[in-house]
Amino acid sequence: MKINEVEQQVGVSKKNIRFYEQQGLLHPKRNSENGYREYDEADVLLLKKIKLLRKLSLPIEEIRKIQSGDLLLTDALQRQLIVLAREQKNITETAGLCRLILEEDCLYQMLSPDQYLERMVEMEEKGTKFKNMSNDTIRKKRGSIIAAVVFILIMFSFVGILIWGYTQDPIPNLLFGLFLLVPIVFVLAVTIALLQRIKELEGGEEDVARKY
């Protein structure tokens, strides 16, 4: 069957099906004539198992280990119970703090955050974990963009120097054009690589209603 049929049957988006294939969790056969993926009932069953375990919040790496036999399903689920219990405690503590702020019954403009931030620090010292405001994807994307912009600026500076040198001591137009073409090609290559990198950072598993 085709990927559209699998998507409808299992309720997993095409993007995530391909993502699981990239992660080595799913290995559909390919049609020798056209190269298209062809899924069978075994693939559908496997995808349903992946969907189940992902809905239970098991990490991709652990699912891979379960499939390879390096980790027992029972051990993985026991570990997940510990993780979920810890998360439940964090949610309970966070909800309690929300209620405490709510009881103050004040407008946002009048809110005094210091006392609650201090309380958060005390709670974190006791093991509570609040939402981490850092975002690795945003940070990596920003780093890639900065590096690309710096490189492009360097190339433009090089182009400027070439043009200035040409005005001071002209060389044959063909040779000048070749010298000018090199940094332009590099700029285009870096721009393409940057777009691919951004797409790669955004191309993980979907985190929406149908993320499985």
Image: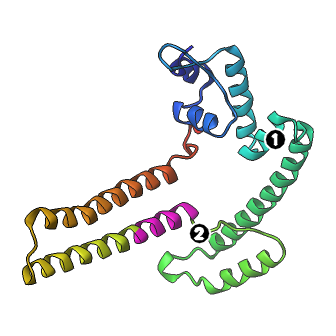
Inspect the image, locate mark 1, and give the three-letter code of the amino acid beneath it. Lys
Residue numbers of the magenta segment: 136-147
Give the position of the N terminus as an image quadrant.
top right
Q: Residues within 10 Å of mark 2 (few under 14, many from 20)?
A: few
Residue 212 visible to an observer of this rendering: no
Q: Secondary structure at mark 1?
A: helix
Q: Secondary structure at mark 2?
A: loop
* In the image, residue 65 above or below residue 51: below
Q: Nearer the viewer, residue 85 or 39?
A: 39
Q: Is residue 202 left or right of residue 12?
A: left
* In the image, residue 172 above or below residue 51: below
Residue 69 visible to an observer of this rendering: yes
Q: Residues within 10 Å of mark 1 (few under 14, many from 20)?
A: some
Q: Which residue is mark 1?
A: 65
Identified at 47% across, 16% down, the residue is: 34
Q: Is residue 121 magenta?
A: no
Residue 7 position, x and y percent, is 56, 24
Q: Which residue is mark 2?
A: 134
Q: Is residue 191 left or right of residue 54?
A: left
Quarter of the image for residue 10 reads top right
Identified at 13% across, 81% down, the residue is: 164
Identified at 87% across, 53% down, the residue is: 82
Inspect the image, locate mark 2, and give the three-letter code of the amino acid beneath it. Ser
Q: Nearer the viewer, residue 2 or 164?
A: 164
Marks 2 and 1, how far apart at CA: 28 Å
Quarter of the image for residue 121 reads bottom right
